[in-house]
Image (tube, grey):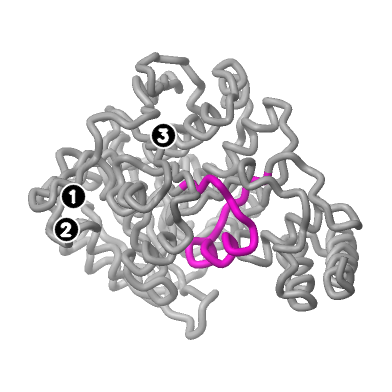
Amino acid sequence: MSVRFGAALLAGKLCAAVARRFSPKRGTNLPGEIALKIDPLFLRRIKGIDPAKTIFVTGTNGKSTANNLILHAFAAAGLSVASNAEGANLKSGAATTLLKNTTMSGRFRKEWLILETDERSLAGIQKDIKAATICVTNIQKDQVQRNGDPDYIFQKIRAAVSESVTVIVNNEEPHALSLAKTAGRAITFGVQKNARASSVEADFGVSMPCPVCGDALVFGHRNLANVGFFGCPSCGFASAAEADYTVTDADFEGGSFRLRTPDGKEIGPFKLAYTAAHFLYNYALCCAVCAEAGISPDVLAQAFATFTNIGGRLESFTYQGKDVTYIRIKQENPETLQSALDTIAVDTRNKIFVIGPAVVDDIVPHYTNTFYTFDCDFVPMMASGIERCICFGATVSFDVAGRLRYAGVPDERIAVLDTDDDETILSEIAKGDAEVVYLITWIKKYEKLRAHAAKIAG
């Protein structure tokens, strides 16, 4: 063991112990940051990591849920696994995970390593930790100030894919599927058309360019925004008629689904605890990974029956007789916003729609915009029974209202609150006859509104 590596290992472990006691939230990244600062080659010096039992989960949307589903299933199978379940997916987060699962002699003490990895960090982590399997959920618009265009992220991910890697990719997302061309082996997962397929019309917006030839793709139908059965008329690149592992018979009301395997067998049913349509792809990916690892359908069924997702994705509270359901989205990410709108559109009850984009303050300079709302179709949601729309926030409330007007919503059904004051927002929500409320905003604002509602209730 080199002196530098030994010092990094000791300092990182001491930092992890202190953080665990005094500041658990900082403990997901800081120990790794310290270890890497002392020894930039810290990750590659750790012994005993088996590439064949190392899995990276990356992509724009769904990687945290998919990673934790896979981790939960592996644990249910009794396998020894280390993972960054807290979502610390940069290089420092990977280093922290390994610090917690490495002996003082520098040997990894688990059998499997499953890491959620940031798209931009994937290639750098892959240089130091050789994963034989890379799972890609999707590659979509997200954080344009940081990530730019999806094609830029596609290039970042492709840099980590080689002939020595097996990719497990989304059959119905064009960018992810095209990675199969550069991998040594490709396994696909997908979702059968179901009752909650995206409400976006085929001719809405600008078509996605083919990642192979650049011409316009044609979608037969979309299960989610920009995810569905597609083909390129110019070069022939297309989703397969059926993925290797396909979720079928999705029953959203009953909370179950089945899986079709590569040999054509139907297994299940499995419990579907989270019934928004995008969760089906997370389950499909998990099924593919677990089947390839030899985990039995019985163990999968047990795991899915007991899985609890990360908090903050879909939550609710009651305020003055109204049921307020919070749907979390990623700002600047039209696919997550469209998924939220599609979820609301399925509910035909009389309801209130509340939206409050926040200032993005994790990147300098801080900023707010609403460009991504123009990539989404609001019309089906509005046709499902929206009594009123409330646009709040001190930065872009009028901009959001303008987007709703563009979708044909009349002024008398739009309330604009040029403020972030909790009481003012809740007072507006309390108005009207609808007892069902859907709220879209950032997680911290939702938590403040929920806490303020509880305080008023006494």
The quarter of the rendered structure image containing the N terminus is bottom right
Residue at (56%, 67%) from the top-left corner?
124
Comparing 240 with 13, the one in front is 240
Residue at (64%, 57%) from the top-left corner?
129
Residue underneath mark 2: 407
Comparing 206 with 346, the one in front is 206
Task: Point out residue 253 in the picture as x, y percentages from the top left corner.
Answer: 39, 22
The range drawn in magenta is 113-135
Kind of residue at badge 2: Ala
Residue underneath mark 1: 379
Task: Point out residue 83 in the picture as x, y percentages from the top left corner.
Answer: 68, 47
Task: Point out residue 225 in the picture as x, y percentages from the top left corner.
Answer: 27, 48
Comparing 326 with 280, the one in front is 280
Can residue 384 be seen here? The reply is no
Residue at (71%, 71%) from the top-left corner?
41
Q: CA distance from mark 1 to mark 2?
A: 6 Å
Q: Name the element at disc 2.
A: loop
